[in-house]
Amino acid sequence: MIETKGFRWFRRVVLTFLTVFTVLPLYVLVVTSVKPLENVRGTFTWFPDRLTFQPFVDMWTTIPLASYLVNSLIVTTTATVLSLLVAVLAAYPLSRLRFRGKRLFSMTVLSTQMFPGILFLLPLFLIFVRVEDLLGIELTGSYLGLIITYLTFALPFSIWMLAGYFSAIPEGLEEAAMIDGTTRVGALVRVILPVARPGIIAVGVFAFITAWGEVLFASVLTDTETRTLSIGLKLYTSQTDTLWNQLLAASLTISLPVVIAFMLIQRYLVSGLSAGAVK
Amino acid sequence: MSFTEEPRSGAVPESGSAPESGSGRKRSRRPGWFLPYGMILPAAVLELSIHIIPMLLGIYISFTSLTQLTIRRWTTAPFVWFDNFVRGLDPGSALGNALFESLIRTIVYTVLVVGLSWALGMAAAVALNTKFRGRGVLRTLFLVPYALPVYVAAILWAFMFNQRDGMVNRVLVQDLGLLDERPFWLIGENAFWVLVIVSVWRLWPFAFLMLLAALQSIPADVYEAAAIDGASTWKRFTNITLPMIRPANLVVLLVMGLWTFNEFNIPYLLFGDTSPESARLISPLIYEHSFVNWNFGLGAAMSVMLLVVLIVASAMYVRMVLPKGSGND
């Protein structure tokens, strides 16, 4: 690629603007979390009056943050693992096998992606209540209902990405394994899955991020016992005051692991996403 | 799990002809025909019970007058045919008027957010698809807003846009002296622009991520040939880059468009149960009717209308941009 002078200027301007746009809020996040409370009550200051890590200590006792964290981890991790399992199983036949109703299935799955969540929030809640009454399986206010919901949320996109990813793997690979006497399922487990691992990880991270950040269904399907972080953080705000330094310290703490995990696998995510998109 | 290993008899020829390579023959009698069905079964059951059936139930509810009085025995809520649609969608009534205004507003919002996110993502992808120092750092940095949980992003921006002592007003009034008074951001007319800014901040890294990957799949010699032919940078972009990443572009735009049109989290987190009028998008409006005013039937009717709009728009988009027979199946 030959770089002209104009292109260099374009690059400089674009990257400077985007860096400022990205970094400024992140700087506010970090700097506020190390300020004492009286410092966040007045007008915003660029630097803390006094550097303190007390918000990171107090945030655990102001609200039951630890139990919200555990709730979020249980729900999100379970939903991610299950959704990966289901998505791998469904994506494989979509990319490799011919069967009647394939087009119908893939179109249906994809089109559920565009359903507004608001459309089925109430019906889903009503169904959950009905199932509880009839079968005695607790679905509202329990982990189970939220896990089932989240696992389905990530499913359409996951199946789509994985199918694209599987299709990018040459068929000769598994055919060779099958000539050697492996069954198709055996070939999937022993040949396709290892090759597709980056894509699978990427899809898993996508599912995790989707569930970790979900607000609407969490607000309806959880109770005080099973409340997840997305709802629990509101409690730093009382009627009169918000403990901004603790709220942002908690936000920073719960974001860090997700952001780091995301960065570690972002390369795989790029190839996974684009495999789904280009196919 | 319900699938079984495909029985393979010795009669299968060595050519390795997998079941899918045969065409036209009646497949249902072949051993292993149930394998694909067994494999998609869990996904199908989940999609059916969490998406399809609730959606159908939602359509049913839109024909009933379900309120907080009838919610406990919702199966017996009175069937009112098209009353909710008539009441909710009549442009002459206050309700219908608010709905159509919100619909227009949501379309403007979607076009702005998707357009800006795409432009920023594209610019960043083009800039970072070249070699220079610090490229890896910037690439990682740009992805942070997308990796952050959405509620963290919204909480953070709400803090910055605080009228009394937020960072934005400090910069505008105190540091730059552009304004004399501290404007309100989270209520009133400005709320719409706050919504757009926060949404773009969250979304553009997604466009960047997808488009950079697409750019990297373009072989470098294509550009070299064009450069030798004397094509300018801009010409190379419009005549080579854009056509070559067209498939990725179309998918990115569609996905971002659907996400943005249905956006609920960001306005809900920024403004709470009731958005200021200037920023009242369609999903929060429906939420308000359903869970603040407790008129579930009306909310459901509006959701059904929203779904119809989305289906028509998506179908038109797909028909317009995708050549026949392409797609991911």
Image: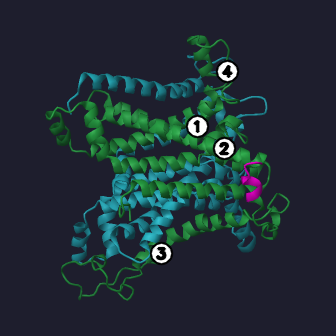
**Colour chain A is painted in:** cyan
Q: Residue at x 42, y 54 (%)?
A: B320
Q: Amino acid at mark 4?
A: Pro
- Between the residue at mark 1 and the residue at mark 2, the CA separation in whole angstroms equals 26 Å
To which residue does mark 3 refer? Answer: B1
Marked residue nearer the N-terminal end (1 or 4): 1
Q: Which residue is mark 2?
A: B102
Residue at the extreme front: B92
Q: Is residue B89 magenta?
A: yes
Location of mark 4 (residue): B183
Q: Chain of mark 1?
A: B
Cα distance in 3D space between marks 3 and 1: 38 Å
**Where are the magenta residues, as a range?**
B85-92
> What whole-number distance in Å separates the C-alpha atoms at marks 3 and 4?
59 Å
Judge depth for marks 2 and 4 and give the one in front. 2
Q: Let me know if residue B311 is in the magenta part.
A: no
In the structure shown, which secondary structural element does the residue marked by tag 3 occupy?
Answer: loop
Marks 1 and 2 share the same chain: yes
Amino acid type indicated by mark 2:
Ser
Q: Is residue A244 above or below residue A230?
A: above
Q: Is residue A255 visible?
A: yes
Q: Nearer the viewer, residue B269 or B287?
A: B287
Separation (CA) of disc 1 from disc 4 = 24 Å
Task: State which tag comes first along the sequence, 3 or 4.
Answer: 3
For discs 1 and 4, the disc positioned in front in the rendered view = 4
Say if labels 2 and 4 share a chain. yes
Q: Residues within 10 Å of mark 2 (few under 14, many from 20)?
A: many
Regarding mark 1 in the picture, which secondary structure is present there?
helix
